[in-house]
Image (tube, rainbow, N blue to C red):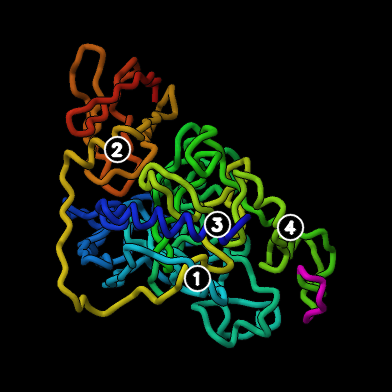
Amino acid sequence: MNYKNNLSIAALLLSLNSFAQSPAITSWIQNTTGITGRHYVNGNATPIVDNTLANVQKVQYSASNVYVTTQGIPAYITGPFLDGNPSLASGQNAIFKFPLNPTQNTGTLTNTTGGNIGVFINGVAMFDYRDGVSWKNSTNALCGGPIQPQCMGDGVWNRDAVVAEKGGFDCAKAHPAMGNYHHHQNPSAFNVDLNTISTVCNTYPSDGLYVIDSTQHSPLIGFAYDGFPVYGAYAYKNIDGTGGIVRMKSSYSLRSISTRTTNASGANVTAGPAVSATYPLGYFREDYQYNATSAATPDYLDEHNGRFCVTPEYPNGIYCYFATVDANWNSAYPYLVGPTFYGVWANRKVTSVTETVTTYTPTSTAINSIENEKLNIAVYPNPASDMLIVQSSIAGKSNRKVDLIDMEGRLVQTQTLYQGSTMCYFDLQTVYAGTYLIKVYNGDNLITSKVVIGEN
């Protein structure tokens, strides 16, 4: 990959993008309806409604920056965290400041860190691969909870949270650290992957920020701490927007090792545990190696897990990260961003807004026109008996009314697809067997699907 040429192109196209209102301003899911978070507790499949506002509460911008105010709580149901994590998703009362014109870091690259490395468009925290524990210090009494410096050992055999903490993720593939609810990986529910690797959704159903659709470009799902956008798993094959829609692939692969005594360069390091069923390949970050030859292929990403390319939101092109998954849609290292940032990094959490800003208020017309282009609706199971799930492909920026109607045109039930959520449920315990219609209203537009309901 020719980074000098990419830098020149990036500078030109970023300047062209600046003439329009930035997606870094318009892409956030703002809470316009007062919806609050909800959570499950272990042993109770009825969610508890919280008092903390969900999604983003305010978006403000200046000529150079955008400020996002959020509690860090999603509209989708959080919890339970079945690995014994005592924390619940709790309000963060945070303001994040992102540059409207991010720049490439042409000097020494900045490693991703423990804690926030970005923010999703619903205001939820984005973390990198790590869970804060390295092998050398994994027996330290402080190394089971929040990230601690003494848990990092000598910097090798750093545990991968997506593998090691899978049992503690909720249905949306996330969990809290001291109340800071976050995703380390592609923010969609386990049960919508092609291969389901966790059964937590069976008892505690939830959704996520979006549902993978292999037929269209994935949505913009967040921004990294260097200011560059993060997209879902699928994009245009070629960087100029041609070639059809394909899965974006990580250029990292598992090393062919049985013992852990060297790093990917071959240098000797402090020994870690041998590869085993307890410590499989992928359990540690150092189990991976970067393949530069893969990154030269159009649908493979660079060492930061991104590339410079055209997207629907950036028709002139911009550097983008992608939430990588494998062919089964299971999360693939390095998952979101990393292990280094492409752009100039800064801690984006600030205590206040200290410059003159304008408050951004999205219009319903703009929201509906954008979302109608991407909206697909799935209704399952079909036939259904006890429960019917209606799931959209993207989390909406406004509420969507969903009706269950019999074939005589009579309204049977009404539910709401809340902004920031992709899923709602119909309880069919009192619904007679027969054929029905599901109608999803999105502004002035209507999507209709037929469903068969059997005997309870």
Who's the residue at 17% across and 57% down the image?
Answer: 360
- Type of amino acid under label 1: Asn
Looking at the picture, does residue 191 appear above or below residue 323? above
Q: Position of residue 445 (x, y in %)?
A: 22, 27
Q: Looking at the rendered structure, which numbered label has been put on residue 404?
A: none
If you read the primary sequence from the N terminus, does the residue marked by circle 4 or circle 2 appear first? 4
- The residue that disc 1 covers is 105
Q: State how far apart marks 3 and 4 are (Cα).
A: 30 Å
Other residues around mark 1 within 10 Å, as few (<14) / some (14–19) / many (≥20): some
- The residue that disc 3 covers is 5
Q: Is the residue under label 1 in contact with that under label 4 (CB below 8 Å)?
A: no
Other residues around mark 3 within 10 Å, as few (<14) / some (14–19) / many (≥20): few
Q: State how far apart marks 4 and 2 are (Cα).
A: 38 Å
Mark closer to the observer (1, 3): 3
Q: Looking at the rendered structure, which numbered label has been put on residue 371?
A: 2
If you read the primary sequence from the N terminus, does the residue marked by circle 2 or circle 3 appear first? 3
Q: Is the residue under label 3 in contact with that under label 1 (CB below 8 Å)?
A: no
Q: Position of residue 188 (x, y in %)?
A: 46, 48
Element on which disc 2 rests: helix
Element on which disc 1 rests: loop
Other residues around mark 2 within 10 Å, as few (<14) / some (14–19) / many (≥20): some
- Type of amino acid under label 3: Asn
> In the displayed structure, does residue 130 sit left or right of residue 66?
right
- Type of amino acid under label 4: Leu
Q: Is the residue under label 2 in contact with that under label 4 (CB below 8 Å)?
A: no
Quarter of the image for residue 344 reads: bottom left
Q: State how far apart marks 4 and 1 are (Cα).
A: 27 Å
Residue range (magenta): 264-270
Q: Looking at the rendered structure, which numbered label has been put on residue 254?
A: 4
Quarter of the image for residue 237 reads: top right
Who's the residue at 32% across and 34% down the image?
Answer: 427
